[in-house]
Image: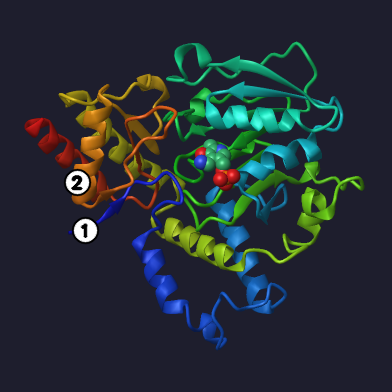
Amino acid sequence: MTCYNFAAGPAMLPVEVIAQIKQDLPDYAHSGMSVMEISHRSALYKELYAETKANLLELMKLDQAEYDVLFLTGGATQQFTTIPLNLARKYHRIAVVDSGHWAQRAAEDAAKVPGLTVDIIASSKDNDYTAVPEIPTEFDQDYDYLHITTNNTIMGTAYRDDQIPKTDIPMVADMSSNFLGQEYDYSKFAVIYAGAQKNLAPAGLTVLVIRKDLLVKHDDLPGLFDFATEAKKESALNTPPVFQVYVAGLALKWLKEKGGVASIEAINQEKAKLLYDCLADSKNFESKVDPDSRSIMNVPFVSGDPDLDAEFVKEATAHQLLNLKGHRLVGGMRASIYNAMPLEGVQALCDFIKDFDAKH
Ligand code: PMP
């Protein structure tokens, strides 16, 4: 029986990417070495780095003259600190839109940067984060930037492109859980960052796309935390995660072959619709998320009865539908259906939900 992995991250990679890794692993590009063994100072890696960066910006429809890409480590979590260290330099004050757990984490960590004030300027806390809050465009204070989270992995909410305004102040987006999974006008953002382990590569790589005018060297920062230094050193100030960058390169080529972000979004929309429609018809289960804020990447659903939820997860696992247990903050189940999840996987889950409803 085919197995489908609905984990929120680390998550599924495309089967074609895994097959390519398997083929390349002992001998990368006829070098006689595995990609896991090649030097980050080698021409082989430099070529890989340049190609991966170019493909990423092409998929995002961003100009290399305007934006740079950093391949970093430390996860999206480290960026909660390093972004304010680099960007909150003039007003020492940032605005955060609180759309759920990860947005709060970003705000909490930024608030630990000495001298920095963090203002929560919008929140959907009052409705249990079942919808995304509207993003303000007018501000009472001067802010160095506005931080948003485009897709809320735990709550299962997301902003569509048309819900994201153009702002006068730089906008920073944590796109960890819908990076390249749905179309945005990426030029609205000054900085976009994402942990790679959901939609791109194995854990250990963080992608940060940044407007070049923001790459100003800060002598008071260690080089590893200074974006301008990292950009100058082509993300190899210290040893970068070569293997992860290689896999990201394969995933980007796969995405290009699929027709790019718009094409994958069309498939992702179809997958999400299938699942939301199935939940709407379900006797036992429902999505609590406001339809206007639905994520097409992470779909939490509940029955309201923890024992029934546990039974569902148990039976689903026996049917090779894996990692459906929901996040402890919301309980129930969560199906993460990133780019690599085929339509057949979502269909298998919907068929299973129908069978489960017939039995329970
Ligand atoms: N932001 C979002 C939206 C996330 O979903 C996650 C991880 N689930 C993080 C940040 C933290 O990412 P990392 O583990 O790469 O630090």
Note whether 28 is above or below 335 in the view shown: below
Is residue 58 found left or right of 10 in the rendered image?
Answer: right
* Farthest-out residue, left: 358
Q: Residue at x 59, y 29 (%)?
A: 103
Q: Position of residue 170 (x, y in %)?
A: 72, 30
Q: In the picture shown, does residue 115 fall above or below 33?
A: above
* Dot 2 beta carbon under 8 Å from ligand 1: no
Query: Disc 2, disc 1: CB below 8 Å?
Result: yes
Can residue 175 be seen here? The reply is no
Horizontal relation, residue 43 to residue 322: left or right: right
Label of residue 190 in the image: none
179, above or below 112, in the image: below
Q: Nearer the viewer, residue 160 or 236?
A: 236
Residue 54 occupies quadrant: bottom right
Could you tell me which residue is drawn at 53 percent across and 81 percent down? 29
Crowding near the residue tagged with mark 1, few <14, some 14–19, many ≥20 C-alpha atoms within 10 Å: few
Give the amino acid type for the residue marked by disc 2 in the picture: Ala
In 3D space, how far apart are the residues under numbered discs 2 and 1 (Cα atoms)? Answer: 10 Å
Residue at the farthest front position: 307
For this orientation, the residue located farthest to the bottom is 32
Answer yes or no: is residue 305 visible: yes
Number of numbered discs: 2
Q: In the rendered view, does 138 fall on the left or right side of 8?
A: right
SS label for mark 1: loop
- The residue carrying mark 1 is 2
* Nearer to me, 339 or 164: 339
* Tag 2 residue: 348
Quarter assignment of residue 139: top right
Which label's residue is closer to the chain start, 2 or 1?
1
Image quarter (top left, top right, bottom left or bottom right) of the N terminus: bottom left
Q: In the depicted view, which residue is nearer to us: 58 or 339?
A: 339
